[in-house]
Image (cartoon, rainbow, N blue to C red):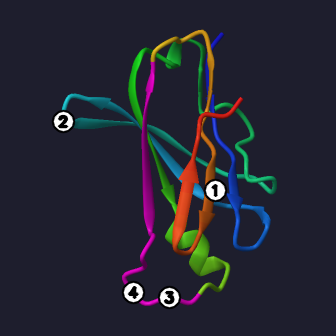
Amino acid sequence: MGRLTTHVLDTSLGRPGQGIRIEIFRIDGNDRVALGEVVTNDDGRCDRPILEGEALTRGEYELLFHAGDYLRAQGVLAEEPRFLDRIPLRFGVADVDQHYHVPLLLSPYSYSTYRGS
Protein backbone atom coordinates (compact mmCIF):
# COMPACT_ATOMS: atom_id res chain seq x y z
CA MET A 1 0.00 0.00 0.00
CA GLY A 2 1.46 3.36 -1.05
CA ARG A 3 1.65 6.39 1.18
CA LEU A 4 2.83 9.99 1.29
CA THR A 5 4.79 11.33 4.26
CA THR A 6 6.96 14.33 5.11
CA HIS A 7 9.45 15.52 7.71
CA VAL A 8 10.47 19.13 8.34
CA LEU A 9 13.87 19.96 9.79
CA ASP A 10 14.83 23.50 10.78
CA THR A 11 18.46 23.57 9.66
CA SER A 12 19.09 27.01 11.18
CA LEU A 13 18.19 25.76 14.68
CA GLY A 14 19.25 22.14 14.22
CA ARG A 15 15.92 20.67 15.30
CA PRO A 16 12.60 19.41 13.93
CA GLY A 17 10.13 21.93 12.52
CA GLN A 18 7.31 21.57 15.02
CA GLY A 19 3.79 22.94 14.44
CA ILE A 20 4.11 23.66 10.71
CA ARG A 21 0.81 23.65 8.85
CA ILE A 22 0.94 21.83 5.51
CA GLU A 23 -1.82 21.86 2.92
CA ILE A 24 -2.05 19.05 0.35
CA PHE A 25 -3.37 19.56 -3.17
CA ARG A 26 -3.84 17.34 -6.20
CA ILE A 27 -2.95 19.15 -9.42
CA ASP A 28 -5.59 18.73 -12.11
CA GLY A 29 -4.47 20.61 -15.23
CA ASN A 30 -4.30 24.26 -14.15
CA ASP A 31 -6.39 23.63 -11.02
CA ARG A 32 -5.31 22.81 -7.48
CA VAL A 33 -7.79 20.56 -5.70
CA ALA A 34 -7.53 20.78 -1.91
CA LEU A 35 -7.27 17.37 -0.25
CA GLY A 36 -6.71 18.47 3.34
CA GLU A 37 -4.09 19.71 5.73
CA VAL A 38 -1.86 18.43 8.51
CA VAL A 39 0.38 19.92 11.20
CA THR A 40 3.82 18.60 12.09
CA ASN A 41 4.34 17.09 15.54
CA ASP A 42 7.24 17.53 18.00
CA ASP A 43 9.49 15.46 15.72
CA GLY A 44 8.66 17.54 12.61
CA ARG A 45 6.60 14.66 11.19
CA CYS A 46 2.90 14.03 10.82
CA ASP A 47 1.19 11.61 13.17
CA ARG A 48 -0.06 9.57 10.21
CA PRO A 49 0.58 9.46 6.46
CA ILE A 50 -0.70 12.51 4.60
CA LEU A 51 -2.24 10.22 1.98
CA GLU A 52 -2.33 6.45 1.83
CA GLY A 53 -4.05 3.56 0.12
CA GLU A 54 -6.76 4.52 -2.34
CA ALA A 55 -6.38 8.22 -1.49
CA LEU A 56 -2.94 8.20 -3.16
CA THR A 57 -3.47 8.10 -6.91
CA ARG A 58 -1.14 8.49 -9.86
CA GLY A 59 -0.62 12.15 -10.71
CA GLU A 60 0.84 15.44 -9.60
CA TYR A 61 0.58 16.81 -6.06
CA GLU A 62 1.59 19.89 -4.12
CA LEU A 63 2.52 20.23 -0.48
CA LEU A 64 2.22 23.84 0.69
CA PHE A 65 4.34 24.44 3.80
CA HIS A 66 3.36 27.50 5.87
CA ALA A 67 6.97 28.27 6.81
CA GLY A 68 6.49 31.97 7.52
CA ASP A 69 4.05 31.30 10.35
CA TYR A 70 6.53 28.83 11.84
CA LEU A 71 9.46 31.26 11.53
CA ARG A 72 7.45 34.06 13.18
CA ALA A 73 6.56 31.70 16.04
CA GLN A 74 10.28 30.92 16.46
CA GLY A 75 11.01 34.63 16.84
CA VAL A 76 12.92 34.88 13.57
CA LEU A 77 12.87 38.57 12.70
CA ALA A 78 12.61 39.49 9.04
CA GLU A 79 11.33 42.24 6.82
CA GLU A 80 7.78 41.77 5.60
CA PRO A 81 7.05 40.32 3.23
CA ARG A 82 9.34 37.50 4.26
CA PHE A 83 11.73 36.04 1.75
CA LEU A 84 10.15 32.62 2.46
CA ASP A 85 6.56 32.48 3.60
CA ARG A 86 4.63 29.66 1.96
CA ILE A 87 6.75 27.01 0.24
CA PRO A 88 5.04 24.95 -2.48
CA LEU A 89 6.61 21.62 -3.39
CA ARG A 90 5.20 19.94 -6.49
CA PHE A 91 6.00 16.33 -7.25
CA GLY A 92 4.65 13.41 -9.22
CA VAL A 93 3.40 10.03 -8.05
CA ALA A 94 3.97 7.39 -10.70
CA ASP A 95 3.62 4.19 -8.66
CA VAL A 96 0.81 4.20 -6.10
CA ASP A 97 2.26 1.14 -4.35
CA GLN A 98 5.40 3.00 -3.26
CA HIS A 99 6.22 5.21 -0.30
CA TYR A 100 6.72 8.85 -1.31
CA HIS A 101 8.57 10.69 1.44
CA VAL A 102 8.98 14.41 0.70
CA PRO A 103 11.08 16.11 3.44
CA LEU A 104 11.69 19.83 3.76
CA LEU A 105 14.97 21.23 5.11
CA LEU A 106 14.18 24.80 6.12
CA SER A 107 15.96 27.97 7.18
CA PRO A 108 14.78 31.60 6.99
CA TYR A 109 16.45 32.18 3.60
CA SER A 110 16.67 28.76 1.97
CA TYR A 111 15.09 25.35 1.70
CA SER A 112 15.74 22.05 0.00
CA THR A 113 13.91 18.81 -0.54
CA TYR A 114 14.52 15.34 -1.89
CA ARG A 115 12.72 12.05 -2.24
CA GLY A 116 13.43 10.24 0.98
CA SER A 117 12.64 6.74 2.17
Residue carrying label 4? 80
Q: Quadrant of residue 18?
A: bottom right
Q: Secondary structure at mark 1?
A: strand
Question: Where does residue 94 sit, x and y in percent of width and height?
Answer: 46, 15
Whole-number angstrom distance, CA of label 3 to CA of label 2: 32 Å
Give me the disc on residue 30. Answer: 2
Label annotation for residue 36: none
Kindly report the distance in space between the C-alpha atoms of the residues bearing marks 3 and 4: 6 Å
Residue 115 figure quarter: top right
- SS at badge 2: loop
Mark 3: amino acid: Ala
Picture coordinates of residue 12, whole percent (x, y): 70, 73
Q: Position of residue 58 (x, y in %)?
A: 42, 15
Label pair 3/4, CB-CB below 8 angstroms: yes
Query: Which residue type carries mark 2?
Result: Asn
Q: Earlier in the sequence, mark 3 or mark 2?
A: 2
Q: Residue under label 1, please give it.
A: 105
Q: Residues within 10 Å of mark 1 (few under 14, many from 20)?
A: some
Q: Which residues are magenta?
A: 77-93
Question: Which residue position holds label 3?
Answer: 78
Which three-letter amino acid code belongs to the residue tagged 1? Answer: Leu
Q: CA distance from mark 2 to mark 1?
A: 27 Å
- Position of 78 relative to 35 (above/below): below
Amino acid found under the numbered disc labelled 4: Glu
